[in-house]
Amino acid sequence: RNILRHRVKGDISKITAFFMRLPWRRMSDYRSFVFRRIKGCNLACWKSDALSIGGFDESFTGWGYEDADFVFRLQDKGVVRRAGTWATEVLHIWHKPADPSR
């Protein structure tokens, strides 16, 4: 693994989750449903769970709330939400910036 090399180069902002293994199952279950913690930008679920609720509702127009609706419907089906805080990392793969003249 070249994790430290990528961290030094700035490719990875945090490396904590690569080295720490904590008892997340006990600590990460949400004890109550909190609407403000729904973030569609970083959401994962089993494909079978997504299919069982019919996926995202495509009738939403404009920005927002389709992710909250998706999570509410998963919750209604009994899917347990878990927090991903400190459990994983978000890695950005570098690419050339888009040409602003286009």
Image: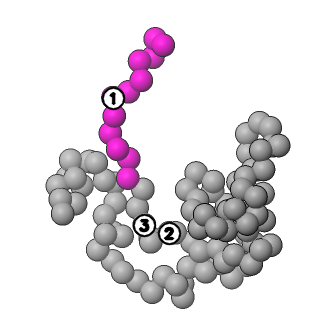
Density class for disc 1 (Cα within 10 Å; few <14, some 14-19, many ≥20) is few
- Disc 1 target residue: 96
Q: Which residue is mark 2?
A: 85
Disc 2 secondary structure class:
loop
Q: Amino acid at mark 1?
A: Lys
Q: Which of the two marks, 2 or 3, is nearer to us in this view?
A: 3
Q: Earlier in the sequence, mark 1 or mark 3?
A: 3
Queried whether the magenta region covers residue 49, the answer comes back as no
For marks 2 and 1, give the one nearer the viewer. Answer: 1
Distance of mark 2 from mark 1, alpha carbons? 29 Å
Callout 3 secondary element: loop
Asked where in the image residue 34 lies, by quadrant, the reply is bottom right
Question: Measured along the vertical axis of the image, is residue 10 above or below residue 43?
Answer: above
Q: Quadrant of residue 3?
A: bottom left
Q: Residue 45 at x, y = what percent?
A: 60, 66
Q: Which residues are magenta?
A: 91-102
Q: Is residue 96 inside the magenta stretch?
A: yes
**Tag 1 secondary structure:** loop
| Residue 10 appears in view | yes
Q: CA distance from mark 2 to mark 3?
A: 7 Å
Residue under numbered circle 3: 88
Q: Which residue type does callout 3 highlight?
A: Thr
The overriding secondary structure of the stretch rendered in magenta is: loop
